[in-house]
Amino acid sequence: MEDKREKLKNFYFQIKDCMECDLGTTRTRFVFGGGSAFAEIMFVGEAPGKNEDLQGLPFVGQAGKILDSLLNSIGLDRNMVFIANVLKCRPPNNRDPEIEEINVCKKYLFRQIEIIDPKIICTLGKYSTQLLLNTDKGISDLRGKVFEKDSRIILPINHPAAALYTPSRMEVLQKDFTRIKEIMDAGYRIPPSCIKAGEIAGMEDNQVDMDKTGEQLGLF
Ligand code: URA
């Protein structure tokens, strides 16, 4: 049987030349994501920036340095986790991702999650949090809470870039990474206090419909 690494590698070769949206024409490199195919922790950011676009790797700029130091602070490094983004190609001038781009690209992230099958997904900032929790609530409403979806933990945290301009945000990030460590140390057991996607009224089959917003579903 093909192992996770092989599957992930094959998936990369399948999608790396994607031209399904206009970002395919402006990117330098497709940024698939990186780390261990066997990771128990996955981080999902927003989209590649300038450095990521040039190198073809996620979080290699300033925000990446912050992410590395936060990982190191809890005894991890980027080879022990998997780091991906909602969008695989850089939006010109680092503009915000557009909804159409997210809708085209999200299937790649979902397949990566399916292959890696992490125990916990830490969503970095608004875009990955809203996509994975299927909500239009802002990150400030969601960070600090622990969610369960598809038998795994989703932990929304601030985007590390937030600490570049507002150093006090670093304390909040550090607190959230301490929470990740606690969850790791507890064997990734889903905390009883977490908010379960399957218990939310209006959803069938315990599945979140990614094409509807949380508000439509009465998620929060
Ligand atoms: N910001 C992101 O969201 N992703 C990256 O890969 C780099 C910066």
Image (tube, helix red, strand yellow):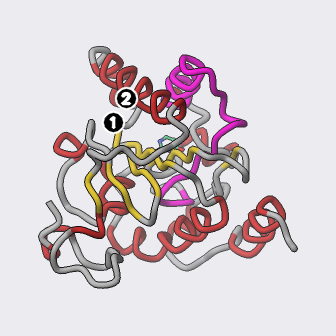
| 185 to 146, vertically: above or below | above
- Rendered image quadrant of residue 72: top right
> How far apart, in angstroms, are the residues tagged by discs 1 and 2?
9 Å
Residue displayed at 17% across by 55% down? 137
Pinpoint residue 134: horizontal percent, then vertical percent. Answer: 29, 66
The label shown at residue 176 is: 2
Q: N-terminal of the two: label 1 or label 2?
A: 1
Where disc 1 sits, the SS reads: loop
Residue displayed at 61% across by 64% down? 112
Q: Are marks 1 and 2 in contact (CB under 8 Å)?
A: yes
Q: Along the line of sight, which residue is nearer the eye, 173 or 55?
A: 173
The residue lying furthest to the front in this view is 192
Residues drawn in magenta: 63-89
Give yes or no for residue 65 being in the magenta stretch.
yes
| 31 to 21, vertically: above or below | above
In-image side of 165 versus 41 (left or right): left
Give yes or no for residue 83 being in the magenta stretch.
yes
The label shown at residue 93 is: none
- Rendered image quadrant of residue 27: bottom right
Mark 1: give few (<14), some (14-19) or many (20+) Cα within 10 Å: many
Mark 2: give few (<14), some (14-19) or many (20+) Cα within 10 Å: many
The label shown at residue 158 is: 1
In-image side of 203 versus 72 (left or right): left
Pinpoint residue 126: horizontal percent, then vertical percent. Answer: 30, 49
Amino acid type, label 2: Asp
